Amino acid sequence: MEDLVSIKNLNIEARTRAGTLKVVNDLSFTIKKSETLCVVGESGCGKSVTALSLMSLLPEGILKVSSGDILFDNINLAQLSETELEGIRGNEISMIFQEPMTSLNPLFTVGEQVSEVIRRHKNLNKAKAWVNAVELLDAVKIPNPDKRAFDYPFQLSGGQRQRVMIAIALACQPKILIADEPTTALDVTIQAEILALINMLKHETGTAVMFITHDMAVVAQMADRVVVMHPGKKVEEGTVHEIFNNPQHEYTKSLLAAVPKLGEMASKKYPEPMRLVGEKKTKALKPIVGTNEPLLKVNNLVTRYPVKGGVLRRTVARVHAVEDVSFTIMKGKTLSLVGESGCGKSTVGRSLIRLVEPTSGDVNLDGQNILSLNQKDMREARSNIQMVFQDPFSSLNPQRPLFDQVAEPLRNYGMVKREVLQEKIGDLFDRVKLPRSFMQRYPHQLSGGQRQRIAIARALALNPKLIIADEAVSALDVSVQAQVLNLMMELQVDLGLSFLFISHDMAVVERVSHDVGVMYLGRLVEIGPRQAIFRNPQHPYTQDLLKAVPIADPDKRKSERDLNFKPLPSPIHDLTHDPVPSEYKEVAKNHYVLTTDCGY
Amino acid sequence: MLFVLLVVVVLNFLMLHLAPGDIADTIAQTMGGADEQDMAELRQQYGLDQPFFIQLFNYVIRVALLDFGHSHFYNLPVFDLIMERFPATLLLVFSAQILSLFVGILLGVYAAQNPNGLSSLFVNMFSLFGYAAPVFWTGILLLIAFSLHIPIFPVSGMRDITIETDNFFVHFFDVLRHLFLPMITLASIFFAYYSRLCRASMLEVLGADFVRTAKAKGLSKKDVLLKHALKNSLSPVITFAGLSFSAVVSGAILVETVYSWPGLGTLAFNSIISRDTPVLLGILIFSTLMVTVGNLLTDLTLKALDPRIKI
Amino acid sequence: MLENEEIEEPTIKPVKEIFQTFFKSYSAVTGLVILIGIAVMGFIGPLFYPTDPFDMVWMPFSPPGADGFLLGTDYLGRDILSQIINGARVSIAIGFSAALVSCFIGVGIGSFAGFYGGWVEETLMRITEFFQVLPTLLFAMVIVALFGSSVLSITLAIGAVSWASVARITRSEFLRIKELDFVLASRSSGSNNMALIFRVILPNAAAPIIVQSALLVGAAITFEAGLAFLGLSDPNVISWGQVIGSNRVYILDATYTVTFPGIAIFITVLAISLVGDGLNDALNPKLRSR
């Protein structure tokens, strides 16, 4: 088939304070008409920059094409004037971006923003463009498009905003659509819908798609062909089956090894570390058995936030963040809480150590009821439960050296004498496999994975029994994510730790957990042993959630028919709202399913 | 808004109370001394022999009824005195504020297009100047330059009393001519601030995702800049302008004194010299009112700009 | 392939890095040098130029350069150069101490409001809002008019009316930082509220507060000059504003009596704002590499 885009020996340079830096190095590939090409790589590999250069939208003064050609429809884009380029952008080449929350102008209605691009390129009058815009909003499946067109972006959900972006991008039937991580910021069910929408529109209009992502599972879902990039260079190119079934380059192999694939643990009763490329083949991957002795029992936990309003700032409504949730964590085992954003899983974690005060319920740690403790005793009890947070950039204090940060809990509790502190911290650095020479460094001198190791070291300092890992690996690149997960599993074996693992990523959850709880709108809708939940999901929400998860295998693509998700209702209710208690049915041993209403 | 005014009134009262000497002493001073009997009478007249809270209550009620006391220097009710001067200050404050916003935004947008260019340098230099030069000093320099050496503008006042005509336009342009230097002086500080802020805010917005979207739609540079970026970058400027209202009023007091502009500022200056405390307190209440109204206007403008803001 | 990126970068303390960035900026260093020069002039200048600023040494309105008076004499025949040298002391002292006062009030109110939230925040921010609406100069005029014009009352009056911006900035920084994970981590590792406020959050909020406080020093100097211009200055000490204020009636006859002290204020405040800009660039985390 004919080449639509042909990139030849492209070099892009970044100007930094330290000098010029090559971000894209001698890159060549082509995109054929009506095909989907996925460009995959980890953060900083130059994939987004390549996309922007195809739009001729590299930020001026920072990034520059230093050599090479970009041919679009046999036209060399570098030879066009700015006016000619403006005529192509949004018309023949269009683009959608990662952050739907910030990609639309907050001060214009979505109707205005869609019709603007139509009027720009199609020479229609205002009224006709508006009609056309409403049709487009309908085509991207926005409900009540004629009314929604008058909404401002802040009145729409993230998924709807991304649909609006797609409507804008496809308004002029472009020859190619560039999608730069379009679903990374979205929940998995919404991701599935957006991916399906892009596929559907692609088949209807015959537009080519350049799909940029870091997520191998999404690649497996979308791609006809794949280009793998690793710092600035193309390391491998091939059809999606070639890449997944017979990867040639070491980097592609290691990338695929690091990706947890949903279903690969189905036959294993206990979680075990991942085998990473580059490690010794002889290294035994022992399953993590754990015990059946309960460590933490949570009964009927409820957490609600007041919503203040009016002149007197009185409570006018409540956010029902966690509603009647009960579970037990065994010593040496991992319980995962999964669910989409806003389901209350993080609030559960924070309620347990009373970073957020729960409204009611019992939290029993080793026989001690945490919720009835006074401030002083609570402080003592916190040493038994420690947290690791999501964002490796904000979880460390930028102003203090790492030694002080790891030592902070020990100093706060006065547990260790000054003379042995140095040695103790050194041990902790060894434990998380960071060189001791890092002790006097500052957080900004560390990579994301290294920061997360420090956060784990800090959590380990007090010899806790339970670690709450709140999306602890979500912000990391897959290869780093795999190492941190392996580290956590090793620590679990060595120290007999229990984990409450809070995550939205079903594949990671399948890899690390003994037990899994699925949350929806503040409720635990299903809980049980991992194998039972993944193999035999009973609650309709769990079933839909599992259907939405893309699998890193091109032979297991989801078909559009599978997708039928309901929009998430609001967790905000007025003061008179009295939710029903959660009741469960035991469908198999230790496998409970919610029988009462949860809003789904 | 009412709350703010109430607090000012109470604060006024407290300060009067805490200050060394009481109202009677102050008044006696302005009258050029009084004997014991007169003082006692004065104290009774002002209810100073009553308990603290009753005095406070009476004071608040009096102010609410627009009774700000009596100026012993001018021998007029303070309220009348202020009302006579108020329009002149209002004119100066609002014209300077609007002028500086307008010019500031224009310059800021222009400079933002070239963050390292000459216009940006100019904006930065100018804002340094606006911050560093005391406003009364700028006023004096302009006065010397444009009224003395090159006499195109009048030295002082608001009207030329020698004009003998009823023609509205003649008077209008006369006031405008008098207004010009004070307005420019006062505006110079603020348009330096606003242009710098607008430039910074524009630069930030130009890096935003939705500006990239606008470019990706194929919009022209002009549309991206004036339609998508400008509207978004106005909010911080307008917000800051609202916060600056009290500073504009403070500046107006100094500027009025330099140009003998017959507003509240010159009145305040004179009342300090003549130790006419009731007038000073009345001016404080009135100018607070002016600032609150200014803030209200700012909030309404912001709401009109941004659909996300609710009042 | 895997995470073996050993970062080969010397361990620099953030504080040291800030100093390095600051001293790389020509304008910031120029500002600092000027500022130190003026302070030195104010504090030890009188030793080398011993003419008393209050002494009537010559004919009134002797123009600059004439009769051996570099900057001329004022309406009472006092040496303006001596007034400017001695005025530096008071102007700078008032500027810095007033800024210190507002910094204390503003940081106190802002940090407690931002950290505790709820009714504490509500009350404190109402107070702040009130001080934002109050025309500061008028309020300071009332204070000084009622309580007498001494250096102390003027300093306190300026400090008391100009803290609102510091409080607002401190609060918004606290609101932002207290939600960051490292604060939660520090809390869950046993830090109490005071430690969180002063040892964890405040150091991370310091940058914009320091910049704002630096700008307040300049603002306080012009503020003092403004009060003095209106006749509200301590008659027993000489300050730049006072020189302008006392000669203001004669500007039409002797321009220089107002020009020179004005230039002194202008240069000083300009130097302060150059230092402030330099601090801003050095402290701004956006510009520093992570």
Image (cartoon, rainbow, N blue to C red):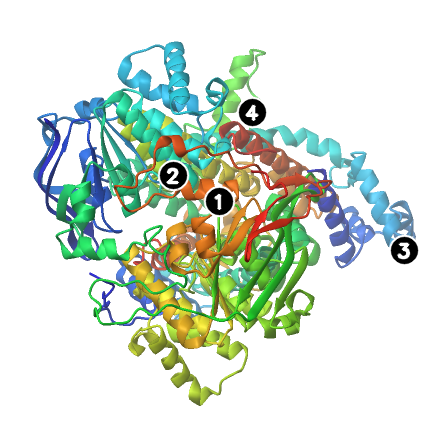
Horizontal arrangement in the rendering, residue C197 relative to residue A506 (left or right): right
Q: Is there a contact, CB below 8 Å, between mark 3 and mark 4?
A: no
Q: Quadrant of the C terminus of chain B?
A: top right
The residue under the point 79% across, 36% down is B64
Residue B4 position within the rendered picture, expressed as x and y whole percent measured from the top left: 69, 42
The residue furthest bottom is A419
**Pointer 2 indicates a residue of which chain?**
A
Determine whether C39 is above or below B78 in the image: below
Residue at (60% x, 64% y) in the render: A297
Chain where mark 1 sits:
A
Residue at 79% x, 38% y: name it: B63
Residue A456, relative to residue C233: is it above or below? below
Checking the image for residue A542, the label placed there is 1
Residue identified by numbered label 4 = B159
Q: Residue B230, can we see it?
A: yes
How would you rate the neighbour count of disc 4 (Cα within 10 Å): few for under 14, some for 14-19, many for 20 or more? some
**Are labels 3 and 1 on one chain?**
no
Instruction: Give the distance between the C-alpha atoms of the residues marked 2 and 3, in whole angstroms.
Output: 88 Å
Q: What's the mark number on residue A191?
A: 2
Amino acid on which the number 3 mark rests in the picture: Glu
Left or right: residue B105 compared with residue C201: left
Estimate the spatial distance between the alpha carbons at disc 1 and disc 4, rounded to whole Å: 80 Å
What SS does tag 1 mark? helix
Mark on residue B36?
3
For label 3, count other residues whose C-alpha is less than 10 Å away and answer few (under 14), some (14-19) or many (20+): few
| Image x and y of residue B38, in percent | 89, 50
